[in-house]
Image (cartoon, helix red, strand yellow):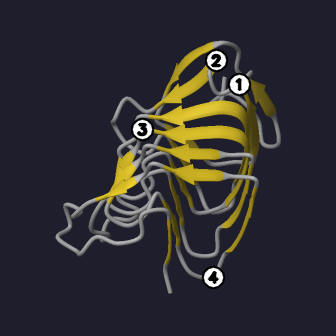
Amino acid sequence: AVNAAPDGATVVLGVGNYEGPVTIDRSLTIRGVGCALTTIDGRNEASVLRVSGDATLSLADLRVAHGSGEPISATASGNFGGGILTEGGLLSERVCIDHNRADLGAALFAGPYAEVVLEETTIRENFDGYGAVYLDYGGSTRIVDTEIESNATDQPATGWPAFGGAINSGT
């Protein structure tokens, strides 16, 4: 359904598990029926959702889980954005992002100049070396009524030192 949706469309996902990873290259809204009922599952293959630079993704009432991140470019070292890797815009409302892994931003990696809004979002039990949420330089972020808890950091595969358990911001 997501792959066939035109720019600006709203895709409604019912009860169930939907396989990722999914690349979003146009502006879309994906709406589920609740975190406990609608899951987009990355099957530990890459970022569950990857949003390209010109696209904006609005998510509501669903769960994003089991992502493992991916390189942001051919020259980048490490995996970025286990749950969501955005180089564009992201609006997350009543979304649960959990059980993802990556070297930078296990739950969410927002690339340079990305615009991110997290409202009533739960970010829990993600594992990486540089924070559950990694916000690169130049973008804007608004976080409202969002829980970021029980995430863990460790030495990433890149060999870089680990830091930033909840939120880390690039310079």
Pinpoint residue 124: horizontal percent, then vertical percent. Answer: 50, 44
Q: Nearer the viewer, mark 3 or mark 4?
A: 3
Q: Which residue position is annotated with label 1?
A: 34
**Looking at the picture, does residue 37 appear above or below residue 70?**
above
Q: Secondary structure at mark 1?
A: loop
Name the residue rendered at 65%, 61% in the picture: 88
Q: Which residue is more in the foreground, 104 or 111?
A: 104
Q: Residues within 10 Å of mark 2 (few under 14, many from 20)?
A: some
Q: Which residue position is annotated with label 2?
A: 37
User: Label 4 sits on what residue type?
Assistant: Gly
Name the residue rendered at 41%, 34% in the picture: 66
User: Label 2 sits on what residue type?
Assistant: Leu
Tag shown at residue 138: 4
Pinpoint residue 43: horizontal percent, then vertical percent. Answer: 37, 29
Classify residue 117 as left or right of residue 126. right
Residue 52's image quarter? bottom right
Residue 158's image quarter? bottom left
Q: Considering only order in the chain, which callout, 1 or 3, is on the residue closer to the N terminus?
A: 1
Whether pointer 2 and pointer 1 mark residues with C-beta atoms closer than 8 Å, the reply is: yes
Q: Considering only order in the chain, which callout, 4 or 3, is on the residue closer to the N terminus?
A: 3
C-alpha distance separating marks 2 and 4: 35 Å
Classify residue 48 as left or right of residue 93. left
Classify residue 45 as left or right of residue 36. left
